[in-house]
Image (tube, rainbow, N blue to C red):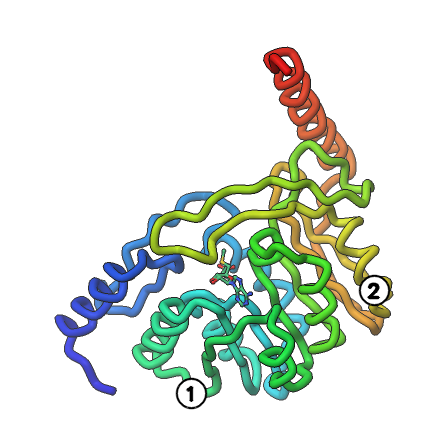
């Protein structure tokens, strides 16, 4: 597909009118998707900076990757540059349409996108097994995180998971905090359900035969990043000083308990 700069800009606008873009893309020649790249760890460019050092140790030109909840396709496309084949799937057809458009503009051949509901047994059964499975920003968005982890475990022996945890919960507690939030208009699958702790996800994955866990958290953030595998991986990771991490955890816990205390005091039930 060859489109002029004006046509590309027009298409970005049309796709964004159906549903706002989530991923910030830079297509060159000053053409960008209209996304605010704040410092939030949930934003694609910042998330990519966090996971790239790990992915570059794991992925090789022979790797196959499944990207669950690929959204506008940013991560699938970037991972395709480092691997043999990437399959990005998303339940939202408008996200798949955007990802397909980005792939064509960026001329990346070894990535494909499909509309698929990972929690639907028949649809998930169609997927083969991959060397790696990424599932970024999805775990807290699905009503059944236990089933999601089970399906991911069937599709790969090595998972790269990123999700939102609850600030008021200690990392060592295997907890699942219910934090419902309704989706924004035009983003029907952007709902929020449960915020699992690191230990919660690890305990579930242990049931599925995973033994190796590498937590890659920044203690001042509530975004968890976990590498889980059925085999031992030799990853070089930058560790935060223990004291910084402990102090930040105490800060988060204190904030969470204070919030609960205020709720109790202000409740008239
Ligand atoms: C918050 S976005 C995260 C996207 C991207 N991985 C990232 O990190 O920026 C969550 C994505 O999961 C998709 N999703 C939600 N439920 C799904 C399901 N049951 N099967 C497949 N994708 C799903 C949504 O449509 C959405 O694109």
- Quarter of the picture holding the N terminus: bottom left
Task: For label 2, count other residues whose C-alpha is less than 10 Å away and answer few (under 14), some (14-19) or many (20+).
Answer: some
- Tell me residue 263's x, y (percent): 62, 19
- From mark 2 to mark 1, how far is it between C-alphas? 33 Å
Is 51 left or right of 176, judged from the image as shown? left
User: Which residue occupies the extreme front position in the image?
Assistant: 269
Would the CB of label 1 be found within 8 Å of ligand 1? no
Q: Against 15, is 131 above or below?
A: below
- Tell me residue 248's x, y (percent): 69, 31
Is 172 left or right of 109, judged from the image as shown? right
Q: Earlier in the sequence, mark 2 or mark 1?
A: 1
Q: Against 36, is 244 above or below?
A: above
Q: Are marks 2 and 1 in contact (CB under 8 Å)?
A: no
Q: Which mark is residue 109?
A: 1
Secondary structure, mark 1, is loop
Is 168 left or right of 83, judged from the image as shown? right
Is 119 left or right of 203, judged from the image as shown? left
Give the residue number, with chain letter if any, for mark 2.
212
């Amino acid at each position: 597909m060859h489109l002029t700069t004006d046509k590309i800009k027009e298409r970005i606008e049309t796709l964004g009118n159906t549903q706002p873009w989530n991923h910030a893309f830079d297509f060159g020649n000053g053409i960008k998707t209209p996304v605010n790249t704040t410092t939030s760890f949930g934003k694609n460019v910042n998330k990519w900076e966090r996971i790239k050092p790990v992915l570059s140790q794991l992925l090789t030109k022979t790797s196959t990757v499944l990207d669950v909840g690929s959204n506008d396709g940013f991560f699938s496309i970037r991972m395709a540059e480092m691997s043999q084949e990437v399959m990005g799937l998303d339940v939202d057809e408008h996200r798949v349409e955007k990802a397909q458009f980005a792939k064509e503009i960026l001329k990346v051949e070894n990535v494909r996108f499909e509309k698929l509901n990972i929690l639907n047994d028949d649809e998930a059964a169609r997927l083969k097994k991959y060397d790696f499975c990424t599932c970024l920003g999805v775990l807290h968005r699905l009503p059944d995180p236990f089933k999601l982890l089970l399906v991911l475990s069937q599709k790969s022996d090595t998972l790269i998971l990123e999700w939102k945890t609850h600030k008021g919960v200690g990392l060592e507690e295997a907890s699942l905090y219910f934090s419902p939030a309704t989706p924004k208009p035009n983003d029907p699958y952007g709902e929020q359900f449960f915020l699992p702790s690191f230990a919660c996800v690890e305990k579930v994955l242990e049931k599925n035969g995973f033994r190796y866990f590498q937590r890659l958290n920044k203690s001042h953030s509530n975004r968890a990043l976990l590498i889980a595998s059925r085999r031992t991986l030799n990853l070089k990771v930058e560790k935060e000083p223990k004291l910084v991490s402990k102090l930040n955890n105490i800060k988060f816990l204190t904030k969470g308990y204070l919030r609960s205390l205020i709720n109790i005091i202000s409740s008239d039930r």
